[in-house]
Image: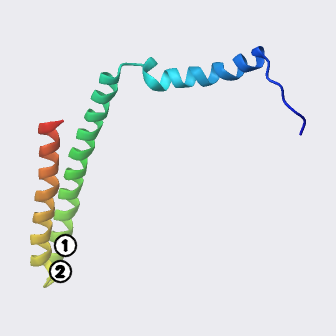
Amino acid sequence: MKNLKFNRRNLIALLLPIGNLLYSQAGGAGTIDAKISGWTTTLKTSLNAGVAAFAVVGAFLIFVQYMQGNEQAQKNFVRFVIGLAIFGLVDVITHVFI
């Protein structure tokens, strides 16, 4: 490989795309407050969807176990309620503090 010599024109041509990328990532596309607000909205929505999915799927599985006469259904129901309470509590705390 031969020696590469960077003159001023080549250096500028190399740094322009990098500078543009850094500017758009570091806040040129919007303020930091707007980005954090968008992230918190996404987090809250994701947690709400997670709690709802956990509740619906878990309740359905416990119902199926009861219908099949599974002896472990009652223990699984208690575990499900405890898990749902913890997951829901995390969701509530997130909504209060974020």
Mark 2, Cα crowd under 10 Å, few <14 / some 14-19 / many 20+, is few
What's the amino acid at mark 1? Answer: Val
CA gap, disc 2 to disc 1?
A: 6 Å
Question: In percent of the image, x 16 and y 50: which residue is there?
Answer: 90
| Residue identifier under label 1 | 64
Closer to us: 94 or 22: 22
* Colouring style: rainbow
What's the amino acid at mark 2? Answer: Gln
Q: Position of residue 11 (x, y in %)?
A: 72, 20
Closer to us: 21 or 41: 21
41 is higher (above) or lower (below) than 85: above
Q: Are marks 2 and 1 in contact (CB under 8 Å)?
A: yes
In this rendering, position of residue 63 left or right of residue 17 = left
> Is label 1 in a helix, a strand or a loop?
helix
Closer to us: 71 or 80: 80
> Toward which corner of the image does residue 73 lie, by quadrant?
bottom left
5 is higher (above) or lower (below) than 79: above
Question: In percent of the image, x 11 and y 38: which residue is there?
Answer: 96
Quarter of the image that includes the N terminus: top right
Q: Position of residue 98 (x, y in %)?
A: 18, 35
> Toward which corner of the image does residue 97 lie, by quadrant?
top left
Closer to us: 9 or 71: 9
Q: Position of residue 32 (x, y in %)?
A: 34, 23
Question: In percent of the image, x 16 and y 70: which residue is there?
Answer: 62
Q: Residue furthest right?
A: 2
13 is higher (above) or lower (below) than 54: above
| Residue identifier under label 2 | 68
Mark 1, Cα crowd under 10 Å, few <14 / some 14-19 / many 20+, is few
Q: Residue furthest bottom?
A: 71
